[in-house]
Amino acid sequence: MHVVIIGAGQVGESIAADLQHDHDVVVVENRADRADELTYALDVLTITGDGTELHTLEEAGVDEADMVLATTDDDETNIVACSTAKALAPSTFTIARIKNTKYLRTWEHDEGAFGIDLMVCTNLLTAESIVRVVGLPAARDADVFAGGRVQMAEFEIGEGSPIVDQTVEEADRFDSLTFAAIIRNGDVEVPRGDSCLLAGDRVVVIGSPHSVQTFARTIAPKESPDEAAEVVVIGGSEIGYHVCRLLEERGLSPRLVEQDHDRARTLAEHLPETLVMESDATDMGFLEREHVGDADILVSTLDSDEKNLLECLLARRLGVERTVAVIDRTSYVDLFETVGVDVGVSPREVVAEEITRFTQSGSAENVAFIESDRAEVLEVEISADSALAGKRIQDAMADLPECVVIGAITRDREFIVPRGDTELRAGDHVVVFVETAVVDEVTALL
Amino acid sequence: MSSIPILTGIADRIDRWRRRPVRVKWRASLGLVGSILVWLAVPLSFPLVLAGYYDEPLLPFLVTIAVTLGVGRWLERLSGDADLGGREAFLMVALAWLAVGLIGAIPFLVAGNGVIAHPVDALFESMSGITTTGATVLVDFSVHGRSILMWRQVIQWLGGLGVLVLAISVLSQLSIGGTQLMETEAQTQNVHKLSPHIEETARMLWSLYSAITLTCAGVLYVLNLAGVAPGMTPYNALAHALTAVATAGFSPDPGSVGAFSRAAQWTVIPFMFIGATNFILIYYFVRGDWLRPVRNEEFRYYVGVVVGTTVLMALLLLTDPSVSFPIEAKLRHATFQVVSILTTTGFATVDFNGWSPAAKHVLFLLMFLGGMAGSTTCSIKLLRWMIVLKGFRRDLFTAVHTDAVRPIRLSGTVVEEETVRDVYAYTLLSVVIFFALTAFIAVDGARASLELTEFEAMSAAAATFFNIGPAFGVAGPFGSYHPFSNATKAAMIVLMWVGRIEILPVFVLLTPAYWRS
């Protein structure tokens, strides 16, 4: 596939790195030094120039490109670049990265507006992924598939958890829930019936949202969320705003702290169910006065990674049970999680994931990455000519590599628990856990 | 004198101020007032025809028509082709009510019957009419012709429509404190005016208002034909419909609505209620948007207050052994009186002077509420009270959470902080004026040996300043304001005028900055 990526920022680079081995990737970047940097770092062709200019795009071969991705930091540039690409080659699939939701609203109103086939909104996607984590506070990672009917979540098994030292068979007492993977010391293991669950292990489970919720409540009763969950959001950025809005939609009444007077007023006007407070969130007096320490979850969406780290550490010290930080620099995520942030969410990673799912070969509709990119959870529709159509799962498994787990199936929008004798049919949506090494092999088979 | 430096300084400043040009194009305002006066000849011809029909003197109306046309034309000619801006609109609003109040008194003076042959009483009655107050100085109704009594009704109906057109099409654009609220409410309804053109808006309101009035008159007359409302002749039906929908309260019968059957009394209640409902809501309701009132927070509040106080009043009457009506009558009087006072209509079905102190005090407190903004009602209005209460609740909250940012919302729409401040100021100013008037009435009443109780003085002040009409004591529902001294009546005339045009236009006119920038 010929892919043109406009903008060699972190998002562009991350996507280019994902695609470089299997596709012809051309990166358009207007800063020559940055373009050079990428030429040496990745196996891609870089072109220095303005991605909104016709001749630059022609030079990049947009007219024969299968896909054009506009991933610069500027919304308008991305929109114009996609529009221009569409004008050059109407059959090209265009994807634009957007921060401002107003363009997303326009695009949702008429998909294909601006000549864009897929619009990916950084702030909204990040907020959605934060809210998913907030909904499952014990989870380190969570994702939904099949229109919300299937949920994937990653949990760490604590010392006192009731499933510690049980085998997977013993622990598997939850309806419609599948253990997809055990991550021990950074190694991904496919669980067998006799695999033992140890304290400190992380498990990836796939199942109905309700069963995942029940599982979360069982292994971490203290952290289980309910309607009365107290959520404090620090920073009234676009991400903070969307987090509060989505939480409001779930019936929660979060608290939001914003330092800027006018922004606080605007947020208070737009978020009727949120208590907006105007203060410096690192002011200990304020945090104590407002009993922020009593909150169940604190989400920090300030504009710098360091501030978010500080905020989360402060909150932990005050007694907040869980902290979530937005981390701009993808490379910080692991570091922050090591020093005390419970969950780090990187907007760039979130966007890169979303975009990559469209660049996957085969028929994957949705992708989630586990342990950065050690493994993936894919949602695939079984086509009529698939090797698995008409087979029972236990037979199908024989054709698949070892490190694959079928986590859930939806048929006609109904959730089906995958068991050995469940027959796969054309049209089924299966959610599978796959180690990255064999993704291509699996998607080819499915 | 001029040797004293400080006085020289003041004189200099006054002189400098005098030399600054007047910035108000007052001629434009006068011109518009002139047009209003010319138009006044049209409603004046209705009692004229009536006078002819009943064989009563035509002179009072012929003279008034001549004066209004003459003065109107003269004022119209005064105006150049200056545009009407914000400042001119303030002046126009204030002068219009004053001018119509003055002209409206002429028929009473020319007819020369009863107490309103005296200029102060004639002006009181006329101003009470055009401001839809409904406070009367009449003592003996029988000495007045039917045409004169109908003129009182017509002038009230005009006052009700006038303020409505003003509120929805003119004042909402001037952003003066309270009326700015209309904007806020209008935004929640997604309309600023009903149409982009003021004239079109005025015409829509005119039609709606007329239709509701005619419906009310029709229903009352049909009840008469059906035999359940004796006395509701076409004359009486129309007379009461005119002042019910205008939430004004004059009646050509000394017994007010109490002189008619209970069917007639029950019928008047919903029309008073409609009169005090935001006409934008009614407009959309009539157009088929049934749920619009329900979605409006102020309307829900309005219904809540009406139902709540009616239940309270009914309980007070039912448990009061000194009131000897049957149960249905107690419920009817409770409902009627609550709606009548709350909507600032001021009709009466019964002499509530004899009710228990608790019941009287509830009615007294209702005088401070008023109906919805954008209706014919007067007083402080529920919208302002809602903002005051929400502001108070916010203050309590922020006393605990000092960093909280909490906008005040009406029907989900945020109210600007500036508007909130204006509402506080307006409400406070209303209460201050009310107390000042109370003190004046009490002192002047004592001087004139009226033997007013403090409560009676307070109620008379509230009833006139908030444009309700009947008070307690001598000025009670079947009483008269005639016994008050001319000084008190003069003060009331001014404050009825000030109260009707929502205080601020008058106060704006009194600031030097208004005249010379």
Image: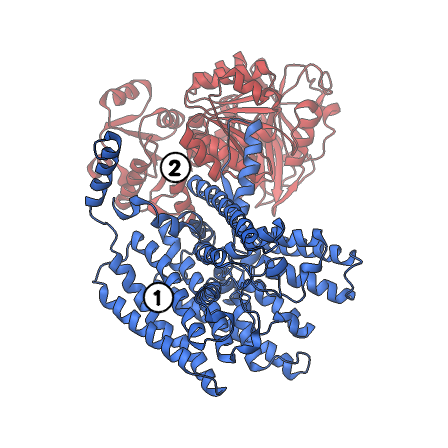
Q: Nearer the viewer, residue A322 or A215?
A: A322
Q: Quadrant of residue A192?
A: top right
Whole-percent x, y for residue B42 in the image: 38, 76
| Residue carrying label 1 | B199
Chain represented in blue: B
Question: Could you say which disc has been placed on residue A100 in the image?
Answer: 2
Spot occupied by residue A417 in the image (x, y as percentages of width and height) = 67, 37
Tags 1 and 2 in contact by the CB under 8 Å rule? Answer: no
User: Of circles 1 and 2, which is in front?
Assistant: 1
Q: In the rendered view, tell whether residue B352 sits above or below residue B255.
A: above
Q: Is residue B359 left or right of residue B507?
A: right
Chain letter for mark 1, please.
Answer: B
Side (left or right) of A224 relative to B82: right
Q: Which mark is residue A130?
A: none
**Residue at the image position 39 percent from the left and 66 percent from the top:** B102
Q: Secondary structure at mark 1?
A: helix
Q: Type of residue at label 2?
A: Asn
Q: Residue at x 51, y 35 (%)?
A: B406
Chain colored red = A
